Every structure is written in structure tokens, then in C-alpha cells.
Amino acid sequence: MDLATLLFWIIAIILVGSSLLVVGLRNIVHSALALVVVFAMAAGIYLLLDAEFIAIVQILIYAGAVTILILFALMLTRTNNVRTNSNPINKVWWIGAIISTLVGAGIIFAVTIGPYSHVHAGGGAGYGPQNAACPLPPNNVAYIGQLLYSPTCYSYVLPFEIASLVLLVAIIGAIVIGRED
Amino acid sequence: MGLSLNHFLVLGALLFCIGLYGALAKRNAIAVLMGIEIMLNAVNITMVGFAFYNTVKPWSTYLTGQIFAIFIITVAAAEAAVALAMIISIYRKRNTVDVGEINLMKW
Amino acid sequence: MALYEYSWLILLSPLFAFAVIIFGTRMWDLATRGRVASQPAHEAETHAGHNGHDESGSDVELMHEKGPRGEDLIFENIEDPKVPELTPGAKISGYLSVVIMALACIYAWILLLNTAGLISVAPLLPTQGISLTQISYAWCQNIDATNNCFGLGSYVIAFHLDNLTIVMLVVVTSITLLVQFYSQGYMERSAGYARFYAYLSLFAFSMLTIVFAANFLVIFIGWELVGLSSYLLIGFWFNKKRKPAEDRLSPSSASIEAFIVNRVGDVGFIIGIMILFVSTGTFSFSQLPTAVMHMDKAVLTVAMILIFCGAIGKSAQVPLHVWLPPAMEGPTPVSALIHAATMVAAGVYMVGRTWFIFAAADPLAFQIVAWIGGISAIFAASIALVQTDFKRVLAFSTISQLGYMFVGMGIAAGTAYGPGLGMFHLFTHAFFKALLFLCAGSVLYALHHATHKETQDMRVMGGLGPMMPITAIAWLIGTFAIGGFPFFDSFFSKDNIIAVAFDTGNYALWAITLITAGLTSFYMFRAFILAFGGKGGNWGGLWGGTYRGKVYRIAGVEEGNQDKTYLVEMSPEEKEHVKVPHESPLTMTIPLILLMIPSIFAGDWFNFYPYIQAGAPALTVRDVLDDWKTWAGLAVSLIGFTWAYVMYARVEFARIHDYVQNRAFLRSAHRVLLHKYYVDELYNLLIRYVVFGFSHIAQAFDTYVVDGIVNGVARLVTTIGRDVRHVETGRVQAYMIGFFGGVAVLAILVFALVTFVK
């Protein structure tokens, strides 16, 4: 196998393993740390898929901000001595297990051996049509920049603006909800 | 064997169902949130995979999956912030983060 | 013809009286009256009283409650409220009724005398009678040219006048007039005086509706109305309590029993009428005898038997006779009018009216009529042998004589008599039975007035003859009239029925009616001797004698409750100044005297049979005296008279009682007869277990099935709601489980569909 495949398998195994640790560990802080590994490995997957910008954004946002957020929340919501189980399992965990198994099996079936799946081989990130007004960007970041901000070429400006509004609302909401009064 | 789209889709499915299990079977609210984050990441992987392996003309030339993934990351971050603010607020009132005990909307 | 055409006035005049009394004079009476029954029912002076000696000689309380020291308690202020003085409104009610009925009676007698040929103010009636068309009213809106309504005959309220009608008119109006006149004395100072006369007028109207009816619908209207009037009049003293020691119901219960038993008969009546209507399309009495010729004979016979069921109920034949003895709880004028002379005769009249329809049916119908009459005759006569209640003897006697009338109706099948044979006995019976009842009322009135209790038991009467001569003689004449004494009424009417029974070949019926004649004379004469005679009287115990009983005085009124009065026995010193029962006032004795005349002479109308039915043989004295059957009947009735005389006038009552009680067969026979063959108990059982059994089943069905379904649905909804609400746990994870569970189910579904459905 070539390098890409090998890297993929290594990253994938670590990814799945640490996600199992996230849901399985009894100490919730340990779970949060395993979550960091999950985020990092996901960034690795993005790199394999020629999505450098997404990978960096993943590290910045997820492994950085969201993780810190979760750790702060864990700090502020400590109920008891850390030695006891701070990440307990529900009484009806087996229902969750069965449901998740079935859902996963369903998706995997549909993807691999279902009647509407077909194997995609090869491929690479092809870049868009040449156009005098919209020249092909040289790299992934520039292309994503064009897709997000360009006023003349095909772009997602409006969703971008709306997403910024969403972030504004989320900031204000989080401040208001998290206030102490 | 070369990589194909199926590898990434199966990986995404696995992660999704592991995250689902975490969301359904954990009692700590923050653990539920962590499960949801895993699920969102699984979806992101799938989206970016589709962006890489697309063959549908003419959109195969656009990185729609990656744009989708950006927005998902954005919204997920916002949602995590708000959710954690709520959990802290509930913790201040009830002194617990056990989701089994937050049942005021009971019959 | 104008004489006949205005005869509908006879029908409407009592209705007019009823309306005036109810809406006018009675309202006036109620408005001007002071407080009812503020006067104590008794004066302080002492009167003769009586107590019951039972047959073994010890003192036994016959009817009333006992006070704390053993005195008798009576409740007259409640049971029979009296007013100190009748208001003008009440008096005018009485006068109005009497005057109107007098006018109607005179009109009826003129009609009778004219059509019988004795006076002549108008031409004779045609044989089929005339129809009084002024009040023929067609109900149905859809009458086509042939007077048909939807293919069936139309419903018309029509009235009809012919000789049969005139006979009944005379009977009804005369007896009603005499009873109304009599009631002025009997119901004196009663609080319900105006109401009584209103009901009597209503009854007269109803009975006349039956008499004038030209079709089954109108006769049914009248049928039900007389039932209603009977109910109202029997239950006239509605506050009276029942007296179980004397086996007497309360008047309210008795009135309900009368109405309901009548209703039971009416079920058959209605079904029979409907069968006839559906088969022939008409209700009319004049059209039916020809219309039924085209009917299937079996269906016609069934219909006529059902119609006869109505007569069984109305005329108190076996098995629907049970209402007549309790109906004696009503005032005695009511018993005289309704339950002796007229209402119970309505059944006989109806059979007489429809006689030709019966004749067109199978002979079985007439046989059933005759046999039920015969069975009732001997059944009731045997019960009357041992009854001790004065009015109850007369009630059973009425049932028995009505049986004779039905026998007369039935055995005339195939002969030329038509309905006349039974109608003649109806005609004579009305007069002497009314006479007997009014005498009974006179006796009861006198005893109640002189003592303070209401006693109807013959065992505590005796020797009343010299004290009440007119009443006694009237009773004696009535006894001779009913018993077939030579040349009195029944000698011609009842004995003729017995003779014709033999002539037409019904030998069994002949034997039954002959024996019943003997029983009749026995028990009537027994009643006479027990009440008016007794051992030690004149003429060998026939007139006067010992008055059996104790003497009472009033001991006072219960404190605080003026309605309860105590009676206590007098000491021998007080007995010296005792007042004995005396003759009733003139308003009561004049009707008695007036009724004595037709009791003796009504049987002498020898042309009765041709009058009713053209072509029937007239009665002649020569034929009667030549017939050996007459002498046989006479012998039997004389045996009855003699035996009664020997037993009750020569031998003491107590000795007879001991004799009967000491022999097992006689004692058990006496008990069976005293309890009226236990028919009442049988009916009680039937109603309690069969009728109420069905009711309980229906009620259980309603409670458990119907209500069960309705309540069950509600309960189901409630239970489902109460159990399903637990799904809403309030925990988000549970909702998520539901959500993703659905997704999992869909996944399985898709997998299954994809794999197995190609």
C-alpha cells in the first residue's frame, strides 16, 4: 500500500479508538482529553483529503476553543470528589448501544453494498472551470476564500453573513445564559 | 488497495454511531455534549470526503463539501458555547449535571 | 226522526257536567272552603260500637292499630276527610250532575218506550239503527272517493243508535242517576264531594261513549276512559291505609290493580282489533259482519278470541277477575255504579255488539266465550260461599253473574236469539245488583255512623232487620231477584239461560250453571241472615236477633296529633245509654225503593228478545212454566235458600265454625275458598319472579352492557391517557432514544426492503 493508505489506516484506528475512549472512560476529564485526540486525528484526515484550510480551522476551533470551553465547563460543574465516577453510564445504556449499532449498520450497508452505492476510485480535488472573471485559485485557501467572499464568482457570501449573525447571537446568548445573578 | 470514498464514508459512519452511543447512554450532560461533538466531526469527515471524491459535473469543480464543513464547524462551535452556558446555569440552580434529574417537563 | 237525531245530547251532557264541575264549581268550592277536617271526626257522646269476635270466641282486633294501652287507634281525619259544611260550590256540583243525568235518563226512557211501542212520539227505529252523523269525524287526511285511506278504511269517530243501544242507555242513565242521588247522602260532608261528582260524570260520559260507539276505535276510547274513571273512583280515598288483618288493600293499590289488570286484557283487545282491520280494512260494526265473510276463518277466530280477551279483563272473568274484589275499596256508590251495573257490563255489551262477527267465525269462539263465562260463574260462586266481607260477597256475585251473561252470549250461537239472551240478564242484573250494593252501602253507612269504625265484616253484624227495615227489605228483594225466586227477575233471565244451555246441547254448561244457581241463592241468603237476622230473631231467625259485638266510646285524641283518635270499650253501665244503628236518611232510601221496582218487574219484559234481535222468540210465561228445566232450576235455588236458612238462622255461627274447623277436609276446603283459590298469591309469584325477573335481566343488561360500553369507553380513554403519559419523562435523552430508535427502525426497514424485495 502506498503512503496515503497507510497513513489513513493509522489515523483512522487512532481516531476510532480515542472516540471509544471518549465514551468509555469513567473520568470525564480523561474523556475530554481523548476528545482532543479525536479532533486532532480528524484534522489529519482532512489533510489526507487535500483540505488544508479545513484541517487548520479544525485544530484552531475544535481542538483549541471547544476543548478549552469543555474543560472550563467541567471545572465549573464539579459535583463531587473526582475519585468517584464522574462520567456514569445511563441505566438503559443497552438501548443506546442497540440503536447506535443499528443506525451504523444501516449507514454502512447503504454505503457499501446497498443497491445505490458505487465505488469511487481515484479522484482528486479538481478545481473549477476557467473563467476570465474567475481565474482558478492557486491553492486551497485561496479557493475557499473565493468561494466564501467573492462578489463576482460563484460564492457563498450570504450564508457566510448569516453564519456571522449566528455567531453573534450565540455570543450574546451564552453571555446572557451564563450570567450569575 | 487504494483509498476510495467508501473508506471515508465507513469511517464517518463508525464515528457517528459511536458519538450516538455517547449521546444516548451517558448521564453527565457534558459527556452528552462530547458525544454530539463526535457526531458532528463524523459528518464533517463525510462532507470533506465528498468534496474530494466528487464526479458530478459541473459542481464537481466546486469545493461544496468543504464549505459545508466550514459552516458546520462554525455552528457547532456556537452551539457548544450556548450549551455549555446552559449547563453551567443549570448546575448553579440544581447543583447537578445529571441529565436524568432534569425532568421538570415530566407529565 | 228528530227524537233520535238529538240523542247525542245524552252522550255529551255528562261531559258538559264534568267540564263545568272541574273548571267551575269545584274551583269555587276549593276557594271558599276553610281548613278541611278541622273538626274531629267524632263527637264526645257514646255510640254503639262493635269488635270482632273470631270464630273461636276470643277477642281479636280486626282492623285498626293499637294505642299504647291497647286502645284502638283510628285515623279518620286523614283517611276520609270531612268538612263541617259543604260549600255552595260543592252542592251545586252535586245538583248539576243529578239534574243533567235526570234529563238524560228521561230522554233515554222516552226513547225506550217509543221504540218498544208503548208510546208513540216518533216512528220506530229501523232495524239496523241510525247513525248519528253530526259527530262523524274523519281522521285521515288522505281520503279518496271510496272513503279509503291508503287503501285501508278511514278512521271515523262515528256514533250509532239502535235498540241495543237504547237498552243500555236506559240501564246506564237510570242507575247513574240513582247512584248520584244516593251519593248526596252517602258522601255527605266529604271533602272531595265535588271531585266525586266530577268523576261520576266523567264515568257516565265514558260509558255512554262505549254504548253509542259505531266502530272499534270509539269503543276503545270509551273502554280506556272507563278504566280511567274506575281508577279515579276506586282510589277516591287516596290517603286510606291498607288493612292486612282483613286482607284489604289500600284504595290506591286497588285502583292501580284494577287499571293494570284491565290493561292486560286490552292487549288482546287491541291485537284483535288490528287483525280485523288489517284483514278487512274497516273498524265499523255495521260493515264488519259482512266484510269478515271474506277472511280466513282461522284468523278471524283468533281475532275474535283476542277481542274477547278485552272483555275478560273489563268484565272480570277468570283469569283476569282479580281486580274486582279489591275494587270494593272505593266508596259503595262507585261499586254500585261501576262494578256492578255498568262498567263490568261493558264487556258483555261489546260482545253483544260484535255478536254477528263472532257468529261468522268458527264456533270455537263462542264456545270459549261460554266456557269462560261458565267457569267464572262457578269459580266466583264457590268463593263467595265463605267470604265474610259484606261487599266482597257482592263482588264475587257480580263476577258470577257476568259469567252467566257470557254463557248466554255464547250458547246462543246458531239460535235465533242473537245477543239478546245475555243482554236480558245484563238488563235485569244491573238493577238488582245496584240495589244490593246500595243496600250494602246503607248498612255500612249506618254502622259507621253509629259506631266510629269502618267495619264490613258480617260476623260482627246481626239483627239489623228491625233497626233498618227498608234496607233489609230491599236486600231481601235483591236476594230473591238474584236467586231465581219465582217471578222475580232472575226467574226469567237467568233460568232462561240455564234452560237454553240444555236446549242447545251444552249439557256440561247446563250442569255448571244449575249448580251455580244453587250456590248463588245460598250465599246471598246467608249474607241476608248474617246481617239482618240471626238466631233468636222473628220468623225463625230471619228478622232481628242478637247484635254480635262490643260497644265503644271515644277515649280521646292523641296529644298533638288530632288525626289519631282512641276508642275504648264501654263498661256495662254505659251500655245502658247506647244508640243503636238506625235507618239511613231519605236520600239513600229513596233510590233503594225506586230500584226495588225494576228488581221485581224488569224480568217481565217478555218481548225483550224480539226487541233486540228481530226474529228471536219472545218469552211467554206459559212456556216457562211448562218447561221441566224451569222446575229443576227452581228446585235447586230453593234448596240453596233453605240450606242457608237452616245453617245460619237456626244454628249459631260459632257452632258452624267449630264444625267446619274440626273436620280436616272441610277445614282445608274452607281455607282454599277463603283465599280465593290462591289466585292472588299465584299472580304475585308470577309478577315477582317472571315479570320482575325480566325487569331485572333488562336492568342488568342496561347496567352492565349498555352502561358498561359507555362507561367502559370513557374508562378506556382515561386508562390509556394515564398510562401513556408516562412516556413524557421530561428527560431529553429519552426523547433522543425515541428519535434515533425511529431512525434505526427505518434502517432495518430499508435493509429488509432492499434485500428481500427485488
Image (cartoon, grey):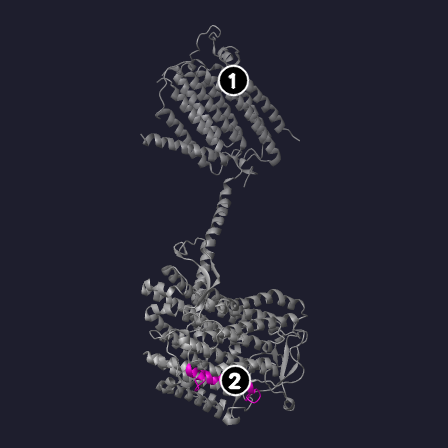
**B81 w.r.t. C335: above or below:** above
Instruction: Please give the chain letter of the residue carrying mark 2.
Output: C
Q: Tally the marks.
A: 2
Direction from residue C548 to residue A104 in the image, left or right? left
Q: Residues within 10 Å of mark 2 (few under 14, many from 20)?
A: many
Q: Which residue is mark 2?
A: C474
Q: Look at the image and tell me whether residue C148 can be seen.
A: yes
Q: Are marks 1 and 2 on the same chain?
A: no
Query: Hey, which quadrant is residue C273 in on the image?
Result: bottom left
Which part of the image, by quadrant, shows the C terminus of chain A?
Answer: top right
- In the image shown, does C15 or C656 lie closer to the viewer? C15
Mark number for residue C545? Answer: none
In this picture, which residue range is highlighted in magenta?
A: C463-492
Q: Residue at x 66, y 72 (%)?
A: C87
Q: Residue type at mark 1? A: Val
Give the distance between the C-alpha atoms of the residues marked 1 and 2, in whole angstroms.
Answer: 134 Å
Instruction: Please give the chain letter of the residue carrying mark 1.
Output: A
Q: Look at the image and tell me whether residue C249 can be seen.
A: no
Which part of the image, by quadrant, shows the N terminus of chain A?
Answer: top left
- Residue B78 lies within the magenta run: no
Q: Which residue is mark 1?
A: A57
**Label 1 secondary element:** helix
- Residue C486 lies within the magenta run: yes
**Label 2 secondary element:** helix
How would you classify the magenta stretch by its main secondary structure? helix
User: How far across and how far down the image is residue A154, in percent?
Assistant: 49, 13
- In the image shown, does A22 or C633 lie closer to the viewer? C633
**C217 w.r.t. C725: above or below:** below
Q: Report the residue that reaches farthest toward the top.
A: A132
- In the image shown, does C248 or C25 lie closer to the viewer? C25
**C266 w.r.t. C585: above or below:** above
